[in-house]
Image: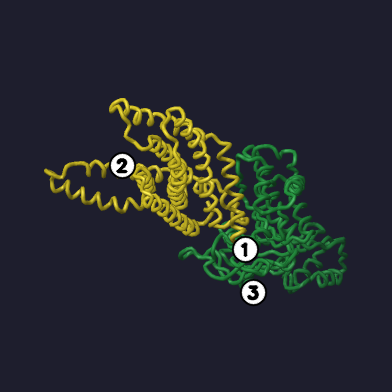
Chain colours: A yellow, B green
Amino acid sequence: MSIAHRAHAIRVLAKREIKSTLYGVGLYITLFIVFLAASYFFVNSSLRNVFDGGILALTNPITEPFFFSVGIAATYLGLCSALAISRERDLGTLEVLFYGPVDTFAYIGAKFLHQLLAFVVVLIFAAVNFFLVSQVTNFGFTSDFVGLLVLSLFLTSCMVSFGIFLSVSTRRMMVSVLVFLGLVFFFLGFSAAHAVIMSLPSQGMTPLMIYVRIILDNMKVVMDWISPISYFSRGMTAVFMGDAAQYVLSLVSSIVYSGILLVASAWVFKKQGVRR
Amino acid sequence: MIETIQLTKRYGDFTAVADLNLKVEKGEIYGFLGPNGAGKTTTIMMLLGILEPTSGSVKLFGKSMKSDYFNIKRRIGVLSENQYLYEDMTALEYLRFFGELYKVENVDRRISEVLGLVNLDHRKKELLRGYSKGMRQKLGLARALLHDPEILILDEPVSSLDPYGIKEVRDILMEENRKGKTMFISSHILSEIEKTCHRVGILNKGRLLAEDTMANLRRRLMDEVQLYIELERASDQILQTVKELPFVVSVEANNNQLSIKTKADRDYRGQLSTAIASRGGVVLSLRRHEMSLEEAFVTITEKNLSLLTEEGPAA
């Protein structure tokens, strides 16, 4: 039964990786930065609204900081994924693994599982942190928050599978990092540019600006399916709107996106081979 | 145990391995020789299922890799030329990880055994980043032996070792062979191949030029045989008689020592002795120069390629 053999290989490989992550400092530094940024975001955004307006008109004020934290952690894990395979290929250890009972699907699956497990560690810290915040500030730690935790895991899987795909496609470690960061900044930049252009009043626009606006809007449709960040935005919107259907759609689309990228990664990996 | 049938690998117009037919029997030590770029590593990668052949097939234990991938991989041990290790692990952690991957039973006891074999037991708790090249090579061998595989595929197993380490590894390999392991050894250290292998295959430009036992390979490769004869007393008459023999190619005399080259189509020592005796000469010693594998290898790849190609590649 190759499924049982493959599952065994995934478990052993992912166990080694997660151990290495837990004994390393990278994850904890990221956690520290995440919570520091989230706290600043929380105080600066939510509480300032209270002071400015005298009232906070948000159903759940910890949702936004939570997504912000998860976004940073997921990007970090995406970057780690982008490094994971190209690094191992660079070091030559990849080839040694394939001398033994490890195949492409087991290897890609283990890399994916490792990053998701690392994210579960982040989630545990995040849950405790936001629970404490909710206790201190008296903002509710509602049952919706559990739904958020689940959704964030699926949204992170998009970022991780995106990283894995880049890692197998680029071969060299440095190239993987540069391409990953380049694309993340491009997606963020595009999103910001789109938001700015769309917010401009259409009256009095030059024909060129209108043309640019149409192009950006059409590109956005494509970007929404390509960019892992878009899946985050959609998930976040679904939670803010309290839209259950959108929430489920967000989960399903994340699974499909991750699945497609992982299968594509396996295909590219087979083409590239395991040698340095 | 290992069989390749018309195995071919092409990269565009370049043919790395062409129509390779190999058969390694159970318990055999097979030496795989060839200069750099001959296609040895490509062949090994195809044996391991890491490279997909362009055409032809590989069978290990009578099965194709695809038909039983995981079980076949568990029955093979591989040692590559370069040891790529997880530098952040100790030898113990490294072997535990592979032990778990290969589902080795009583893994800690087995780790002790293999580390003892390669004489690294006392360094097992050190990080691998501190290991020397030789230690890495030995640890690689320990990893290859950890799951007690039936086939060992070794690519340059002694290339990074000092003479003592070479002997150590050779002894381990011979012992494992005595226990029944089949071995496929690719190496450029020809003396090692000669000391360990039962049969040798010689690859050049992706083609198997020769595959035979060492003795037969020598016979096929030599077009001349060098003989050294010590006479009680050499004379011009004896020298002239020897020179006139139809199978003698050349004769050099140094006092009572004769250095004679004869044709290699058969053994002429008897006829030579008789001819010398007929002129009253007394042969004190007659020694035939045995070609080492190293010489044979050079001959094959540089000089007498035609000798092998005339006979055609080995079946």
Q: Nearer the viewer, residue B93 or B7?
A: B93
Amino acid found under the numbered disc labelled 1:
Met
- What subunit carries mark 3? B
Q: Quadrant of residue A98?
A: bottom right
Q: Is residue B258 left or right of residue A19?
A: right
- Judged from the image, the secondary structure of the residue bearing numbered disc 3 is helix
The residue under label 2 is A189
Amino acid found under the numbered disc labelled 2:
Gly
Label 2 in the same subunit as label 1: yes
The residue under label 3 is B311
Dots 2, 1 in contact, CB < 8 A: no
Establish if A21 lies above or below B212: above
Q: Residue at x 50, y 42 (%)?
A: A119
In front: label 3 or label 1: 1
Q: Quadrant of residue B287?
A: bottom right
Q: Quadrant of residue B217?
A: bottom right
- Judged from the image, the secondary structure of the residue bearing numbered disc 1 is loop
Label 3 in the same subunit as label 1: no
Q: CA distance from mark 2 to mark 1?
A: 47 Å
- Judged from the image, the secondary structure of the residue bearing numbered disc 2 is helix
- What subunit carries mark 1? A
Q: CA distance from mark 3 to mark 2?
A: 69 Å
Residue B80 in the image: state x and y as whole percent.
63, 52
The residue under label 1 is A1
Q: Nearer the viewer, residue B8 or B243?
A: B8
Q: Is residue B227 left or right of residue A32?
A: right
Residue A4 in the image: state x and y as whole percent.
61, 59
Please indicate, yes or no, whether residue A188 appears anywhere in the rendered image: yes
Amino acid found under the numbered disc labelled 3:
Glu
In front: label 3 or label 2: 2
| Number of residues whose C-alpha sits closer than 10 Å to that of mark 1, classed few (under 14), some (14–19) or many (20 or more) | few
